[in-house]
Image: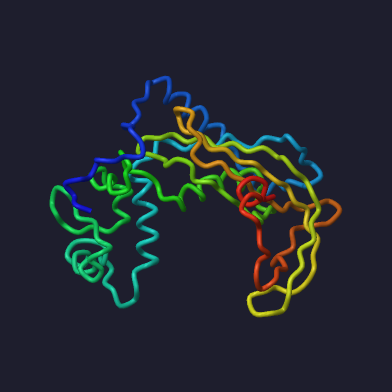
Amino acid sequence: MDPARLGEHMLYERGAHNYTTQNIQDALGGIKKKTRRGSVTLFWEDVEIGDELGPLVLPPWTLQDQLAYHFLTYAASAGEEMPGDVYAFEPAYHNMRRWPGRARIHPNTYWPWTPGNEHEDAVLSPYRTQPLPFDFGLQRCQFPQQLLTNWMGDDGFIRRQQASLRRPVFYSDITTYTGEVVKKSVVVEKGTDKSGGIPGEQEYYAVGIRIHGFNQIGEEQSPGTATVYLPSREGGAVKLPIPHPEKPPYVPFETFRTDWF
């Protein structure tokens, strides 16, 4: 895309949010309410449908949050034959020259950058038709995992989690995650001894949770669902590894999107 055309078509029209002192005090109040169950066991029998999780309040999203994510992913993705600074300075330039179609040309410097930099550079984010730096979708799926682990404690196990990516978490956004228990069941997991599978048959005590994540102006960013296995007074601890076939069963999209518990 011609850098001169950046900003012609945008998905959203938003600037960085300006908070009042009271807004920040409210956010800090939510952050201080966060609790972690830790080693205090939550038994399946003690959970009721309608129980609430959270809130989990994430502070205004900043470039520091994004760079922490990039630091980990870049460190993990650089090949052994590449130098440690393959994504910076001169090595980054040569790296981009290897895949010219992948590079994003900065409209100020006309220097090639990686597509990932569209997330954190306010000048490059219009390549994605976004008005501000914004999070990675993978990050947005990971954020509510803390909501689940804080609630279930050390003895629980997240069996599955699904998140819909409705709106980005933009620079300066505060996100509040909440959850609600909507289902309890006892399930039987069956596996195979074929390559990729785990053999056996085991009973698990499951809790279905509906998750919501809203920003400071009331927009839902990432609704989702999760299934958590909890220890049971009758059935004992969650037994790992969980038996499973070599190929997961097909889940229809409508089920996956709305009620995958």
| Horizontal side of residue 49 vs 216, given as left or right | right
Residue at 77 percent across and 72 percent down: it is: 200
Nearer to the camera, 218 or 250: 250
Q: How far across and down, in percent of the image, does residue 208 sit?
A: 70, 46
Residue nearest the observer in this picture, 70 or 102: 102
Q: Residue furthest left?
A: 109
Count of labels in the image? 0
Instruction: Give residue 35's quadrant in the image.
Output: top right
Looking at the image, residue 182 lies above or below residue 157: above
- Classify residue 16 as left or right of residue 175: left
Closest to the observer: 38 or 129?
129
- Note whether 108 is above or below 241 in the view shown: above
- x and y percentages locating residue 242 in the rendered image: 71, 65
Q: Residue at x 38, y 21 (%)?
A: 21
Residue drawn 23% across the image and 71% down it: 98
Among the 4 quarters of the image, the one containing residue 114: bottom left
Residue 244 x/y as whole percent: 70, 68
Q: Residue at x 69, y 50 (%)?
A: 261
**Which colour style is shown?**
rainbow
Can you give x and y, in whole percent of width and height, for residue 132 in the image? 31, 39
